Image (cartoon, rainbow, N blue to C red):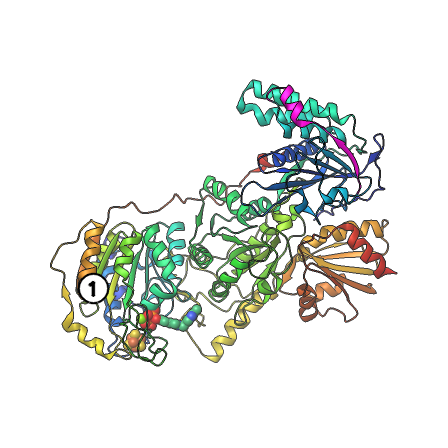
Amino acid sequence: MNQIETTLDRPAVSVTDVQTEALTVVMLGSGGSGVMTAAEILLRAAARAGYYGLMTKSFGPQIRGGEAAAFVTLSANPVEIQGDRVDLLFAIDWKNAQRFAGELQLEADSLVVSGEIDAELPEIVTGAGPRLAEINLKTLTRTHKGTRPNMVALGAVAGAIGLPRDVVAALVGQQLVKKGEAAMAQGQTAVDLGYGEAANFALAKLDRPAGDTARWIISGNQAAGYGAMRGGVRFAAAYPITPATEILEWLAPRLQKAGGLLVQAEDELASINMIVGGSFGGSAVLTATSGPGLALMSESIGLAVAAEIPMLVIDVMRGGPSTGIPTKSEQTDLNIAVYGLHGDAPHVVTAPNSIADCLFTAQWSTHLAESMQVPTIMLSDQSFGQALGIVEKPAELAFATRRLVAETPGENYKRYALTETGVSPMALPGTPGGQYTADGLEHAESGTPSSGVADHNQQLEKRLRKVVDFDYGDHWAQIEGDGPAAIITWGSTTGPVRQAMRRVDPDGRRLRLISLRLISPALPGALAEALDGSDKILVIEQSQMAQFFGHLKAQFDLPAMADLYARPGPQPFRAAEIAAKLEEWLS
Amino acid sequence: MSVETACALTARDYKSDLKPVWCPGCGDFSILMAITMAMAEVGRPPEDVAVISGIGCSSRVPAYTSCYGFHGVHGRALPLATGLKLSRPDLLVIATGGDGDGYSIGGNHFMHACRRNVDLTYIVMDNQVYGMTKGQPSPTTPPEWDSALVPGGTGLSPFHPLVIALAAGANFVARTFSGDPKGTAQTIVEAINHPGFSLIEILSPCVTFRPEEREWAKQVHPASVDPTDDRARAARRVLTDDGFNTGILYRGKRAPYQPAFNPDTSANVDFEAEFLP
Ligand SMILES: Cc1ncc(C[n+]2csc(CCOP(=O)(O)OP(=O)(O)O)c2C)c(N)n1
Ligand code: SF4
Ligand SMILES: [Mg+2]
């Protein structure tokens, strides 16, 4: 895996001719004002101009309409999280802006541009006392017929941060091509109006990006779906749930294109059993859900453990417990994913550590499931799933091992034969001589139900061995740096930690990062090796009850001196918060 | 499979060597016989047939056949069978189970399987009791039936699976009696050959927890009218009969749900273009 370098650190600057390494822009407006479209074009333009970036969306509780905000952080270097504070806030209108209190970190040298003249500014703005500017969107769009406020806003923001005008104009043209030439011309006019206004804003310009590497714009949910398809998944069944639905909606037409199928089930009890059936028939399968759905599925994931049915279950975590906070992230399904199955039920739990890594981890997880004939739960989360990132084009990977299939089962074929690896050849329906009954009841090697001591012990041992003895290679964790103070983390906390480390330890002499991609089974030996030479350990996670820390202590022989920084969501970790924590911890 | 061997297949070829765990006299024995007789008549080789079930005495059927089988979890036979059939349309997929498995814990899947109309044959062995857990009322148990768990009876009117199946969109609906294995086998053959989702509700006495059900042998009688393709008529018929009318009630004409499934897993999926900025 390539190391991702992130450096968003910069002095606070606010003068036009000053260059800056990263900028965080927020575009705000009521539903239907087109802020999301404008922000996506902004992100795309930045990618074309060679920048990295991240876009997250925040909506009010209304199903449609209401206030919406797009957060866009751009940099010449890789970006994994939003900046600590907002450099530029552009409001097309202010209708319900106060509801973003707590999310919008404005400071005195932040620039706030109001698209309305003499608007009553919400407290989130007045309280911070930022620099203020205005654009009369109403008058501008009225005097230039056919121009849209969001496109003027786009031009103004792009101009203010220093994106090349032609790149933005080309994308706007592309966006409007279906609406005809007049609309395209009006789009150009709107962008130019915005660029004209931007000349009056005092804002630092983004540094020029150095390299010219191939970039993708992708969300964690798209990346997870694509990774699973690259891993061979062609059959899926699922029930919609925030924030996992985008995986399903991305997959449905693309599976179809690849000759596969996604079925919308009546509930999660059905979807998990549909994929058990699909996998029994020989397909690589997946379902995607979030905490409430995972809870419903747990009985049948246990069935897949007992009957040795490979499957990928992607859990895009959200705030819990219960319905919790569907649109915000939290790392709190670890316990149910690792410990939530009844009986002694060894299975695999993985977690990506960045948006791009959702692709790798989903492909790898499919490979693990298929190779070991075991259910694999991948713990992604809302902050990956629903964010759009400009990332380096991910490498193409191919894992060699596939499902071990009994092509020509002989006279004495036994589905659950005790083999050296613990993995037994699986006969697929349609294969003469391979007939067996897959069973959630404990069984003998043949599959015949058995409550005998020997059969139970042998089958338990086989199912555990195949998972524990598997060679996970280097993929079990992402390890960066080799300083004496080690930070252990996982999932979406990795980005903020990585970034805070660069601030606190710019030359990489004091810190090391160990981010676990394999959550279960535990590899205590590998962790001990990764910790070799460290004299201090800090575990960081987004969970009130410190589920990850508890798991490390119980399963990984985590040294007793290990410290902990854990807190719940919904507030995402920012680099500043973790950097402050690290300073305190190191001193 | 050569024509010669295909012709030679008998009910016996569809039976495994496993001895059923059922109580002597249980109605499920003759249903197992009827299922294997029907398979022999349909003639698909055992490796091309998959028998899927949940949990219960009646859900033990798969391992007693020589086909591929899946004995899954309680109530989920239908979604499992659905996933298998949609991804393996070449197979003959049969689901079996009991009244508790199919109408109580699996009730939602039952409705949606009828509605989805995948080409499955669903055989419910209705003994109007939870046999495996030793005698609790099921959704089809009469209201006054006394049991340890619900003393004095449930007082609830029984669930009407055939009417629900019709309302939900099942494409073939029949009722038979375990004491008539030949007639049952014939109905299963027809159900298999009928496209879409077929329900065969088979009255199957639980001699241990509902010994009075032995009387069913005297009560059942074949329906005096032919099957219809009119759902409303079929529903009226079952709502007004005595519950012991046997025969094929309804043959619908809905096309089964079978979206294309012919994946080429070797083909490298390439969606890179949509991620370029
Ligand atoms: C989730 C779950 N809940 C409860 C049970 C216990 N259980 C096993 S079989 C059964 C009822 C079976 O009744 P039915 O489907 O009518 O089958 P029968 O034994 O009567 O043939 C129950 C409640 C279980 N196995 N799983
Ligand atoms: S308990 Fe009833 S249903 Fe179960 S095997 Fe015995 S007689 Fe049959
Ligand atoms: Mg029953």
Residue that sits furthest to the right in the current view: A587
- Give the residue at mark 1: B176
Residue A140 image position (x, y, % from top left): 67, 23
Residue A313 placement (x, y as % from top left): 53, 56
Q: Which residues are magenta?
A: A129-146
Say whether residue B8 is visible: no
Picture residue at 32% right of the left edge, 70% below the top: B138
In the image: residue A237, left or right of residue B224? right
Chain at numbered mark 1: B
Q: Is residue A404 left or right of residue A57?
A: left
Residue located at (24% from left, 73% from top): B205
What is the three-letter code of the residue carrying label 1?
A: Thr
* A145 is within the stretch colored magenta: yes
Quadrant in which the C terminus of chain A appears: bottom right
Q: Is A272 above or below relative to A393? A: below
Q: Is residue A294 left or right of residue B253?
A: right
* A281 in the magenta segment: no
Crowding around mark 1 (Cα neighbors within 10 Å: few <14, some 14 to 19, many 20+) is many
Q: Is mark 1 within 8 Å of ligand 3?
A: no
Residue A303 % position (x, y):
47, 65
Measured from the top left, where is residue A269 in percent x and y? Answer: 45, 59
